Structures are given as structure tokens and as C-alpha cells.
Image (cartoon, rainbow, N blue to C red):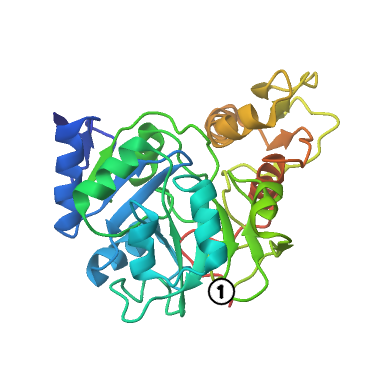
Amino acid sequence: MHQPMPQGAAQTGLVATELLQPGAAGVERAAGLLRAGLLVAFGTETVYGLGADATDPRAVAAIFAAKGRPAHNPLIVHVADAETAGRIVRLDDRARALAAAFWPGPLTLVLPKAEPSPVSALAAAGLETLAVRVPGSSAALDLLRATGRPVAAPSANRSGSVSPTTARHVLDGLGGRIDAVLDTGPCRVGLESTILDLSAPEARLLRPGGIARAAIEGVIGPVRAETTATDTPNAPGQFASHYAPGLPVRLAAGTVGDDEALLAFGSPLAGAALTFQLSERGDPDEAAATLFAGLRALDQDGQRLGLRAIAVMPIPERGIGEAIADRLRRAAAPRFPLDAEPSR
């Protein structure tokens, strides 16, 4: 029902990462590891998350160590339903309305912590708020129910690098650093969740994602966008440099050089040494689902071929296109070392 990671996948030699198959046995094994304070990556509808028991401070600390994640960057806590969310955060009328409309689904709400809170203070990075969501993946929900505890789960990758949308992506980045990966197949949405801050009277969009701002505003009214970079985040995905491949990323490309890889949207530009098509028909939803896989593929093959950059064709910033643009801007931003904490 489960198998060890293939030989050679782990480079650190720290642990033997198990690759768990979907189904009841794999879910129960993953839940048992989580309850034991170990790290398990699992697929959601957005990206693969690196899970740990959110009530166990040592398990939560292990997430930061495995990812090389700055300790002041808070985590999203995943729960199986809105009722469970109400035990760890204080839900107001807006949160209840959004939960009814979009949970399970790719929406994270930042809310004041319930007191007393069972969740480790480290998961909230010492803040008085907590980011929480109910994922829209049946496999993830099965795992959460089997675990019986809230699960802290940032993206299952090295901090700052491209988010994983398959189990293979997880093993490539964290094999040997974590205890298991529950292989639930490719992620359907392919971009992280929308993050909405409801800790103050004015709702603030902190990160665009799988739920469009217009859809949220249709439920609770106006939402202020606050997606500029910060070194003191109150939710994930707010650093200027994030989701970054190894090769530099050039945005809004109207031409492409023969020493560049091309991330294409619609009819591709001529002249690229290497091309990955996000959506030939120009569909932003299709592009979102393949964005991170495309960046990974072009980065890996482009570095092998000695290319100098990844050129990205323009993608309209409507609907989920707003989230795509956010990820690409951060991928193209000046980098900080993955193991270093950026200036605060």
C-alpha cells in the first residue's frame, strides 16, 4: 500500500521518504504519521502541502526546518469543515457567508485566533490571527478527517521556489527531508488559495488565487487589494521574491531570443530555444493549472541547455489571471537566498 522513495531521490540522507498511494490504506498511514508528529506532503486542489499536526509545536517547527522557511512567515492551517474552523478562529458573519459559498475550496481566511487556541503559536508566527481553510480535494478532506486534528500545511517545496503540483515535484525538492508523500495525482487548480484578511472591519485581499476577487465581493461587498510585497507578512506568499525558478524570469515578452525558454500563452512567439504552452486557446484557468509545472520544466531543461532566462508572454489579469500575474511578478523579482531570512 505504500513504498519507499525510489533510490537516488533523496539527496540529504536524513530520512527515507515514503511514497504513499491513494486510497484508505495510504490515507490511514499518512494520518498516523501526522498524529505521531511527522511530516507528510499531500495534494489539494491548489498545490501539494507539507502537513504537520498544527497543535504540536515540534512538528510545526519541523516544517520550517524542512522548507528553510523564515520563522516569521505564518502557515495556513487546514481543517475538514467550517465547524472545526470555528474552534480555532473567531468566525464573523462575513467569514460564515464566505465559508458557505466557497468551502471546501481554494479560499483562505485570516481571522482572530480563538482563545484558548489549540494551534501552536509558531504556526501563526506569533500573531494574534490565524490563516485557515477547508481544502476542496476529497483526498485532502479524507486525510484531515482521519487525522482528527488541524493540519498546518504550506506548499511542499523549499522556501521561495516553485510550488509543487505533483508528488514527483515534492520528492524532487524535499525527498529525504520529510517522512512521506501521499500521491493524490496532479492538482486541479494549480495555484495556491486566495487569502482574504477578515481580522479588521475592512476586508483585504492579501493574495489572489483560485477564488476571484469579484466572486468574493459578490458575497461580502468591496474588498481592498493589498498584495504588495512585505518583509513582515501576516499570511503566506507576501514576500517580493517567491515561486521562483533558478533561471531569471522576464515578463510581458513580445519577442524571445534563441537563448531563452518561452512560457507561451496563445499563439507562441517564434525563435525560442524551448517552449512550454500554458494554453494554446488562451484559457486562463488552463494556464493556472499548468503554470508551476511549466516553470519547473523550462527551468530544468533550460539550465541543462545553458539558456539565460525564461520569457513569459502576457496573460490577461482577469479572473484567475490576477493570481497568475501575482505569481509571475514574484517569480521575476530579485531573489533572496532560499535558506536566508529576508530583511525585516
Taking 248 as reference, is 75 left or right?
left
Label 1 sits on residue: 199
For label 1, the crowd category at 10 Å Cα-Cα, with few meaning under 14, some 14 to 19 and many 20 or more, is some
Please name the residue shown 15% across and 42% down the image.
29
Q: Nearer the viewer, residue 232 or 177?
A: 232
Please name the residue shown 34% across and 46% down the image.
174
Can you tell which quarter of the image residue 297 is in?
top right
Element under disc 1: loop
Can you tell which quarter of the image residue 298 is in?
top right
Q: How far across and how far down the image is residue 7, in percent? A: 22, 31
Q: How far across and how far down the image is residue 212, in percent? A: 66, 46
**Which quarter of the rendered picture does the N terminus lie within?**
top left
Q: Nearer the viewer, residue 103 or 324?
A: 103
Q: Is residue 240 depicted above or below 45 in this figure? A: below
Please name the residue shown 72% across and 18% down the image.
281
Please name the residue shown 58% across and 66% down the image.
197
Q: Amino acid at mark 1?
A: Ser
The number of numbered badges drawn on the structure is 1
Q: Is residue 247 depicted above or below 70 in this figure? A: above
Taking 328 as reference, is 138 left or right?
left
Q: How far across and how far down the image is residue 9, in percent? A: 29, 35
The answer to whether residue 176 is visible is no
Q: How far across and how far down the image is residue 70, in percent? A: 45, 68
Q: Is residue 23 depicted above or below 93 in this figure? A: above
Q: Is residue 293 depicted above or below 144 in this figure? A: above
The answer to whether residue 144 is visible is yes
Taking 68 as reference, is 300 left or right?
right
**Which quarter of the rendered picture does the C terminus lie within?**
bottom right
